[in-house]
Amino acid sequence: ETGVTQTPRHLVMGMTNKKSLKCEQHLGHNAMYWYKQSAKKPLELMFVYSLEERVENNSVPSRFSPECPNSSHLFLHLHTLQPEDSALYLCASSQDTRVGGYTFGSGTRLTVV
Amino acid sequence: GESVGLHLPTLSVQEGDNSIINCAYSNSASDYFIWYKQESGKGPQFIIDIRSNMDKRQGQRVTVLLNKTVKHLSLQIAATQPGDSAVYFCAENSEGNAGNMLTFGGGTRLMVKP
């Protein structure tokens, strides 16, 4: 374990379902990120939170809705997804802006059917 | 966890040989660089980093070289082992980047032959 824990590890959902991905870090980091890693594209930044405030939203469809209730937890709420949303969703955290790199979780492998 | 299906450059080396993985970046303002390793079923793991005021940094069996003139970064792995088989990503950041957002390269797949 890297210190960033993601659940579930695997998720299969229908296009009409609503589900949530969870990320938790106890590293004392202040910034958290959601990335999408698919078979057709490299790592894509989706959302960035710094001190629980969203600082970046990279034109992500509204069917993805992030939530950061505190600096240790990050959620990605999913609803009415499409098959092309199937991918590995990675959460990462970093200590602060401009300090070091990211610590990644192991990801949630999402399959939309 | 790797980008299965994505056409990644692949480097195939014999166990015990040295490996060199290259990365080109485009932002001349980038001043911080990282190499990540991603094994199957896992997220990317930090390997080594380097700031732009250096041109070389060494870790355990790994060396990162930075050539700012041609905007090129390389990762050298000495005495490559089967456990080094993975996808390797370079990432860059610059002082002007708000929120510490790294920009990731597409990755290179390293395959180690026993």
Image (cartoon, coloured by chain):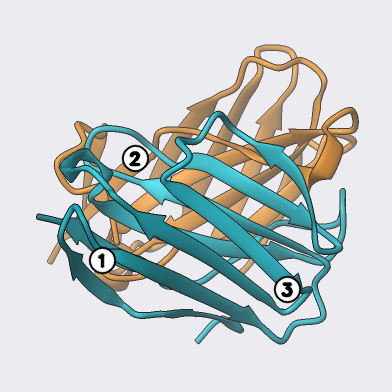
Chain colours: A cyan, B orange
Labels 1 & 3 near each other (Cβ < 8 A): no
Q: Which residue is mark 1?
A: B40
Q: First in sequence: mark 1 or mark 2?
A: 1
Give me the residue at 87% from left, 48% from top: A98
Vertical side of A57 occupied by B47: above or below: below
Q: Position of residue A92 (x, y in %)?
A: 60, 63
Camera-nearest label, 1 or 3 = 3
- Is residue B107 in sight in this rendering? yes
Give me the residue at 86% from left, 63% from top: A51
Q: Which residue is mark 3?
A: A69
Vertical side of A33 occupied by A40: above or below: above
**Closer-to-camera residue (A70/B58):** A70
Mark 3 to mark 2 CA distance (whole Å): 36 Å
Q: Position of residue B53 (x, y in %)?
A: 90, 36
Q: Position of residue B72 (x, y in %)?
A: 60, 23
Apparent side of residue A97 relative to residue B81 in the rendered image (left or right):
right
Q: Which residue is mark 2?
A: B108
Q: Secondary structure at mark 3?
A: strand
Q: Quadrant of residue B96?
A: top right
Vertical side of A62 occupied by B72: above or below: above
